[in-house]
Amino acid sequence: MLDDTFAALADPTRRAILARLRSGEATVTELARPFNMSQPAISKHLRVLERAGLVSRSRDAQRRPCRLQAGPLKAATDWLEDYSRFWENRYQNLDELLDKLKDEDANDG
Amino acid sequence: MLDDTFAALADPTRRAILARLRSGEATVTELARPFNMSQPAISKHLRVLERAGLVSRSRDAQRRPCRLQAGPLKAATDWLEDYSRFWENRYQNLDELLDKLKDEDANDG
């Protein structure tokens, strides 16, 4: 599950497709337009996103618009959440360093 | 950058290595132990993690312990953050549906 999600996200075109779908459903034709890519190339990326459960397609045979499915993104974020204390500590250390430098600067002046 | 991060995270062994490094530095030998994997196999995963900037190794020639680097994980989380309103809406919709069902149930009783 996480394997498929992270693998699907490891491509700039697929991330751009997801970003486009944030503003609403879109057909393959609509998705292909801004990318200067063939529809088959876009369809291939869509299949990866569908397999990862990140995109669903309606059964409307004429248009079959694609829709964002955010569930797997939440699972990925939950996994990453366990690491947040590491970058928070890192920024805290930076803040402390900046405060120290400011104090030294004030003492010099 | 995000390509490398997400590709590195798309493997359960590499995610388990990062989880292990949350509790502190570890050598390749220490990392290989719980996985029932050869050291070369673990080293290959470590190279992927190092290329993605998720793991650094000290220059101590004897041990070269590995350390977690959380910066790229923060960048990945920041990217995912833009999608949080989708799963939040989804849960809000579920809450509303449950409230509606409870009201109907109360009216039936």
Image (tube, coloured by chain):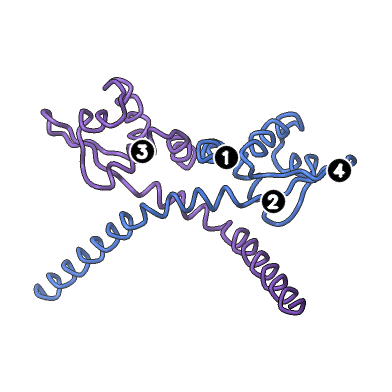
Chain colours: A purple, B blue
Residue at 36 percent of width and 38 percent of height: A16
Query: What subunit carries mark 1?
Result: B
Mark 3 vs mark 1, CA separation in Å:
25 Å
Query: What subunit carries mark 3?
Result: A
In the image, taking residue A93 as reference, residue A34 lies left or right, namely left
Residue type highlighted by circle 2: Leu
In the image, taking residue A8 as reference, residue A59 lies left or right, namely left
State the SS at label 3. helix
Q: Which residue is mark 3?
A: A16
State the SS at label 4. loop
Q: Which residue is mark 1?
A: B12
Residue at 33 percent of width and 28 percent of height: A47
Q: Earlier in the sequence, mark 4 or mark 2?
A: 2
Q: Residue furthest front?
A: A109
Mark 4 vs mark 2, CA separation in Å:
15 Å
In the image, taking residue B82 as reference, residue B47 lies left or right, namely right
Residue type highlighted by circle 4: Arg
Mark 1 vs mark 4, CA separation in Å:
25 Å
- Residue B42 position, x and y percent, is 71, 34
Residue type highlighted by circle 1: Pro
Please determine if labels 4 and 3 lie on a single subunit. Answer: no
